[in-house]
Amino acid sequence: MSERPEQRKDPVDAIIDQWAAVRPDLDTAAMEVFGRINRLSHAIGERVGQAYARFGISRGEFDVLATLRRSGEPYTLSPRQLSATLMLTTGGMTGRLDKLERAGLLRRSPDPHDRRGLHVTLTDAGLGLVDQAVAAGLAVQTEALSALDPRRAGQLADLLRDLLAGTDRP
């Protein structure tokens, strides 16, 4: 991509330099972008996971609680809706729901319109916990993003939105 001053080099630059030495024919521009996205995702994901752990939940469990919270009152969805939103198998979802129900953060109840169906509802304890956890996770993300001024952060969000939209193409 572009030459960076030596003090601005990062681990991805070292990987790119290694590829250039052994395979100078490769265009590694995509690797420069996606290597950094992957490293950033991992690093911030770990920090956010630590923030959630202070509340006794994992990132995956947070995702369930947050999905219920974002659904609005009465904070109720079916297991199928949760699985579809979180792109999880029903088996994976069942394990998360079991743990969160045992912790008193959600409850399952029969669907009054479908004898075979269930509703998953956030409890008051779950609502309080997810509201605290989302603030803690956002604080971690905001701190990381503070390396950029607001204009550049907005540009990055726009660029990533465009890049993500491009993945929807066949």
Image (spheres, rainbow, N blue to C red):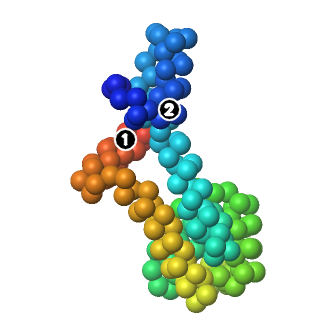
Instruction: Check disc 2 and report its element: helix, strand or loop.
Output: helix
Instruction: Check disc 1 and report its element: helix, strand or loop.
Output: helix
Q: Residue at x 47, y 42 (%)?
A: 37
Badge number at residue 67: none
Badge number at residue 163: 1
- In the displayed structure, 98 sits above or below 157; it is below
Q: Nearer the viewer, residue 5 or 21?
A: 5
Amino acid tagged 2? Val
- In the displayed structure, 136 sits above or below 27; it is below
- The answer to whether one can see residue 79 in this image is no
For this orientation, the residue located farthest to the front is 7
Image depth: mark 1 or mark 2 in front: 2
Pick whichever of labels 1 and 2 is earlier in the sequence: 2
Q: Which of the 4 image quadrants contains residue 107?
A: bottom right
Q: Residue at x 40, y 29 (%)?
A: 6
Q: Position of residue 1 (x, y in %)?
A: 35, 25
* Crowd class of label 2 (few under 14; some 14 to 19; many from 20; radius 10 Å): some
Q: Position of residue 137 (x, y in %)?
A: 51, 67
Q: Residue at x 53, y 18 (%)?
A: 19
Q: Position of residue 53 (x, y in %)?
A: 65, 69
Q: Residue at x 57, y 59 (%)?
A: 47
Amino acid tagged 1? Leu
The C terminus - image quarter: top left
Q: Is residue 61 left or right of residue 26?
A: right
For this orientation, the residue located farthest to the bottom is 124
**Which residue was labeled with disc 2?**
12
Q: Position of residue 91 (x, y in %)?
A: 73, 61
Q: CA distance from mark 1 to mark 2?
A: 19 Å
* Crowd class of label 1 (few under 14; some 14 to 19; many from 20; radius 10 Å): few
- In the displayed structure, 29 sits above or below 129; it is above
